[in-house]
Image: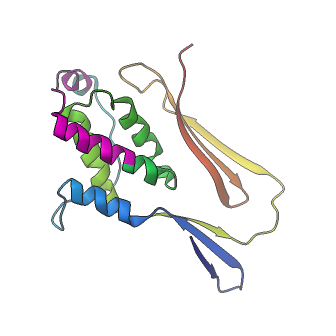
Amino acid sequence: VTLSQDSDGRKVVQIAADKRHVELIHKSLGFNSKTKSVTTPSQKMSDGEFSRRARDPELSPELKTLYLSNVMRMSFIAQDRGDLGEVVETFAQSMSSPRTCHMGDLKRAARYLLHRPSLALTYRQQKLPKAITLSVDSDHAADKATRKSTTGMVMQLGSHTVKNTSNLQSAI
């Protein structure tokens, strides 16, 4: 948490995840200064890619431990970063028996953290807003395994984001 004032003398609070966790993820995965970054934490999968991934072998016990450790670390970071919520939710679904493809997904998210190592929620002093703004969207049954939808939600009080979520919808 960082406290400051803007040029108009209004108080400014910034909340950011601890960058040490990002550094530890990169170190544990063997990333270095030559590792390339990506601009999104995940990518949409084709039906063919989905069926190929189902045949991937499970991770060895050592790699499974590495995977689980980094997923939990990324989950901790995601509490302060709305951009990681959906991808961490996907990782959590594979924690019981992660496959080599899941490790690849984790590495992609870690490469995204090279692109955006830190993000901060910024709260500038404002007058009490008259309304709460709620923005919601869904990906319409994009989960290839369950055909469930993921709903994303951002709640704002004036210009301040006060809550964001990414939830897998239950089946009807």
**Is 68 or 161 nearer to us in this picture?**
68
Work out whether residue 37 can be spotted: no
Residue 24 is covered by the magenta coloring: no
Q: Main secondary structure of the magenta part?
A: helix
Colouring method of the image: rainbow
* Tally of marks: 0
Quadrant of the rendering where the N terminus is positioned: bottom right
Quadrant of the rendering where the C terminus is positioned: top right
Q: Quadrant of residue 28?
A: bottom left
Q: Quadrant of residue 62?
A: top left
Determine whether, in the image, residue 125 is placed left or right of residue 130: left
Tell me the magenta residue range: 50-72
Please say if 125 is above or below 170.
Answer: below
Query: Residue 41 in the image: x percent, y percent?
Result: 35, 48
**Is 137 or 78 nearer to us in this picture?**
78
Q: Quadrant of residue 160?
A: bottom right
Query: Residue 68 in the image: x percent, y percent?
Result: 31, 40
Query: Residue 12 in the image: x percent, y percent?
Result: 65, 75
Residue at the location (80% across, 52% down)?
A: 131
Residue at the location (23% across, 37% down)?
A: 64
Work out whether residue 71 can be spotted: yes
Query: Residue 161 in the image: x percent, y percent?
Result: 64, 56
Please say if 24 is above or below 14.
Answer: above
Seen as rendered, the residue at the extreme top is 172
